[in-house]
Amino acid sequence: MSRTPGFGIRAACGVAALVLATAAAGRAWAQAPSPPAGALDRAEGLIQGRSFAAAEVVIKDILAADPSNRRARELLAYAFECTSDLKGERRVRSALAAEHPEDARIQFDYGRVLERSGEAGGALRAYRRARELGSAAPGRDLDAAIERTRYQAAVEVATPVMVMSDPQANASRVDAGAAIPAGPHRHVALLGTRYAATATNDRVATASGALALSLVENGAGRSWSVGPRLHAVARPGSAREDVGVGGVMTAAAALGPTFEIAGRADYETPWDEAAVALLHGGSSTSAEGHLYAHGASRRLLLQMGALRRRLSIFSAAPGSDERPEAWQSLWLAGADVVVWRAAPALHGEMLDESLTAPRPLPSALTIAYRHYGVSAAPSPGFAAVIGVAPRASVDEASVNASAAAPGGRVGAAFRAGAAFDAARHARVWSAGATLIWAPRSATHVALAYDEASELSSGLLGRRRTGSLSLHVDL
């Protein structure tokens, strides 16, 4: 279920948008009554100079005298587009599309505003209408728009498989899920997961399963998801199962052009970040928040965040129903700098493995710095089973590089980081890579591998993770 890529609206407005509007209005210009002398030219100049509010005043004066002036109405629609007035732009383009059903350019522009409104089905119909009408709409852009909206309205299915290992356990995870469109910018995600973990000495094995249901919205400037979780774990050496009912809520929003906030809350969800956590029936309840600030043409990203969580596991005592706990806090601050970026991107776009957020693969090189601290207060029963650093103060430098081959059929991403923990005088490292093959916009196959000397959350011991996933739009 592909997501709508961001439109470079403000960058594209002005001269380019004005040329399109003027060209599209050519046939109707001679039929309309003459507006006040020079008024339309003045409106064009104001739009080109990005004085959109002043341009709207001039255009509305023209339309007050001549409500049917097509050229003025198209200029008004572009002014609305440049100021992100989606409702105003849609109102004007909808009326133009109804009055000029045989004009390919108008149908194409109407499809664009419908797509940005999250109405993929209506946009697809408008784009197909523009194609039927002939060559007045740009062929390459129209073909891409039809392909894009076709998959926005499709059901996306995913079947990721993951294996992981650490000093105490080996584990596997198999998912099967689907994302089903449920309105503008919204979908319902259903994901079933089967876990299996075995101790490295082969004496203990744990099997568990989870079912996640989420209502998701990924709109312009905001996103959120909410839904219940069902988790069942079979206790080692017992026919009994522990069943837990919890939930997850996430939200993110832009606060103007510079700042963004994001948060997440989990209640009684599987603790599945490491094989040892799965082996001991780990469960997590947590809350986290992040504040981001963009700068320098969005090449610089500053952030700070905090996480507080309660972890619980099976007791090591045979027959005990107690679940030892650990409280953990993590806070961080850092910066990301985009050193290089280019236009090529992977063909099509899919959701992440949780089926809740888009997973783009841009062509870019980013370097990052993080300072984070970790503190943990495990109970004696917890500490006897899983090693967690009681305190950490880490400075980490990392690099992330990703690129898509020409044509966008193959993409790759590489990541590596090195850190020093001043609290424990320990050095930490991580590295990983992902290879994605997109034979069609509707199909992505991803292969990934990551290795780290320990997890940033304070879990001690080397971790290895490999995964293979298939995402398909039906």
Image (spheres, rainbow, N blue to C red):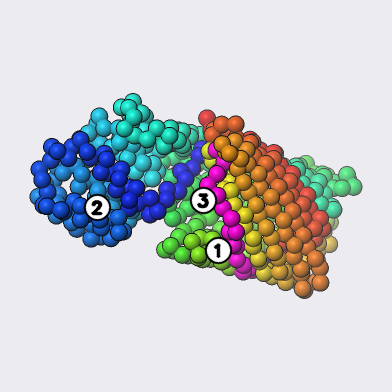
Which residue occupies the extreme top position in the image?
132
117 or 237: nearer the viewer? 117
Q: Residue 271, relative to residue 443: is it above or below? A: below
Mark 1 vs 3, N-terminal side: 3
Q: Hey, which quadrant is residue 388 in on the image?
A: bottom right
Can you tell which mark lies on residue 226?
3
- The amino acid type, in three-letter code, at marker 1 is Leu
Numbered disc 2: secondary structure: helix
Mark 2 vs 1, N-terminal side: 2
Q: Which residue is mark 2?
A: 44
Q: Position of residue 335 (x, y in %)?
A: 60, 66
Crowd rating for badge 2 (residues with CA inside 10 Å; few <14, some 14–19, many 20+): many
Q: Is 370 left, or right, of 29 in this rendering?
A: right
Magenta region = 324-347
Numbered disc 1: secondary structure: strand
Q: Residue sitting at 28 percent across and 37 percent down? A: 106
339 part of magenta stretch: yes
- The amino acid type, in three-letter code, at marker 2 is Glu
Q: CA distance from mark 2 to mark 1?
A: 36 Å
Is there CB contact under 8 Å for labels 2 and 1?
Answer: no
Q: Position of residue 381 (x, y in %)?
A: 80, 63
316 or 406: nearer the viewer? 406
Crowd rating for badge 1 (residues with CA inside 10 Å; few <14, some 14–19, many 20+): some
Q: How many marks?
A: 3
Q: Hey, which quadrant is residue 141 in on the image?
A: top left
- The amino acid type, in three-letter code, at marker 3 is Val
Q: Residue sitting at 14 percent across and 38 percent down? A: 30
Q: Nearer the viewer, mark 1 or mark 3?
A: 1
Q: Which residue is mark 1?
A: 301
Q: Residue sitting at 83 percent across and 62 percent down? A: 384
Mark 2 vs 3, N-terminal side: 2
Q: Residue sitting at 76 percent across and 69 percent down? A: 421
